Image: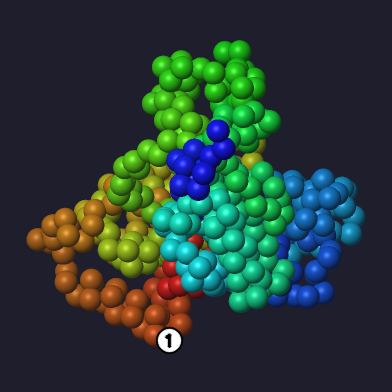
Amino acid sequence: MIPTIGDPATLVRWLYLDMNSFFASVEQEMNPSLRGKPVAVVPLFADTTCCIAVSYEGKAFGVKTGTKVGEAKKLCPGIVLIEANHESYIRYHNRIVETVESCVPVETVCSIDEIASRLTGSQQDVEVAGALAEKIKRAIKTQVGSSLRCSIGVAPNRYLAKIAADMKKPDGFTVIRPCDLPAALFPLKLRDLPGVGARMEERLKRTGISTMEKLHSLPAAEMQRAWGSISGEKMWHLLRGEELLEKATGQQTISHSHVLPPELRNEPDALRVLKKLTTKAALRLRHEGYWTSGIEVFVRFLGQDTWKARCALTETQDTLVFIHAIGELWKKLPTGAVYAVGVVLPGLVPDSMHVPSLFDDPRRGKLTRTLDEVNQKFGKEMVHFGATHDAGKLAPLRIAFTRIPDESEL
């Protein structure tokens, strides 16, 4: 029997867009002289750090995301190294989201370079979905940048659409219909599944699961045992094209970290960077409408364990309180070769649930809000606390792929 249009076995419900070599492509778009050349975007110019994005011309030489810069130079002697320009990537990201939104409603911004849209009505027909994917690709190239390419996947659920988007790169389009399952997944490796990293792959192999076909043959209960958690049962349903309701979870922490360039890998400069990160975290805390009753700092060393320290605070948003707290914690820092620093504001409490302390000085809160308003109007860090004066332009904006900084942070 030949499936007809509207047959549930042929309908796709999600479209997933994955920008190809996004950071490197943005650099090539902004600088036409880089087009057609191997380009690697790096956090800083040091052979010991890693490439965070590589153009397809560079990938042809075996350079990948995560390749050490020193190794990348050996694999591709002519590779052009570009220090990451995160503000530009955020601006291009926002333009891409707007462009996709003009073609189909954006359901979820999954990361700086990935977007998911739920398909409805006639969009669920494969031919219509294919035309929509082509429209999106064309719109990005004409409205955002001709160097920017994306791969798009459509499938019965978002998880499978993400897998489909990764099947053909660059500039690919892949369809997985319900009637294509499970055969469409069998050529994949276990590591091709989002959420299956090196450790999980090794765990599965120890239980005799080394192929997608073997994994798919497991009953749901065995899949849960193989994962060691309910995630295994969820995976069982997702691989069969089923949709699962996602639980809404409140934000739990705000954090910032920074790998130090070689010239700042000493205790005084590391503390300066940590103060800057703390200031940024406090600004986010206020901007997003949260309070916290604690602060945690961590320091990664070369050749020794990561050091962590934390302290409790009266529920606060006050930058100066945080700066004082990390100064006290820093006194306990062990000796060693500092490599990276970070700060975490845990246990977030929304404005609506904050109970003011009887000992709070309302003038401090008003002062902090006024500083935020001045900096928002006249430029960030136009006015700052004396405790962070020597931080200067340290710890510039960085993007975590799962969090896109707000425009106010640029």
User: Which residue occupies 61% across, 22% down?
Assistant: 213
Badge 1 local density, few (<14 within 10 Å), some, or many (20+)? few
In the depicted view, which residue is nearer to us: 327 or 25? 25
Residue 296 located left or right of residue 29: left
Residue 17 located left or right of residue 252: right
User: Which residue occupies 23% across, 57% down?
Assistant: 350
Image-quadrant location for residue 399: bottom right
Tell me which colouring the rendered structure shows. rainbow
Count of numbered tags: 1
Q: Where is residue 217 in the image (x, y as percent from the top left)?
A: 54, 18
> Which residue appears farthest toward the bottom when viewing the image?
378
Locate the N terminus by quadrant: top right
Q: Where is residue 36 in the image (x, y as percent from the top left)?
A: 83, 65
Dot 1: element? helix
In the depicted view, which residue is nearer to us: 223 or 360? 223
Whether 227 is drawn above or below 388: the answer is above
Q: Where is residue 322 in the image (x, y as percent from the top left)?
A: 34, 59
* Residue 158 visible to an observer of this rendering: no
> Which residue appears farthest toward the right when viewing the image?
77
Q: Position of residue 250 (x, y in %)?
A: 30, 49
Image-quadrant location for residue 96: bottom right
Whether 111 is drawn above or below 237: the answer is below
In the depicted view, which residue is nearer to us: 129 or 300? 129
User: Which residue occupies 46% across, 57% down?
Assistant: 122
In the depicted view, which residue is nearer to us: 279 or 240? 240
User: Which residue occupies 72% across, 69% down?
Assistant: 147
Amino acid, disc 1: Phe
> Which residue appears farthest toward the left when viewing the image?
358
Q: Mark 1 points at which residue?
A: 378
* Residue 284 visible to an observer of this rendering: yes
Whether 70 is drawn above or below 374: the answer is above
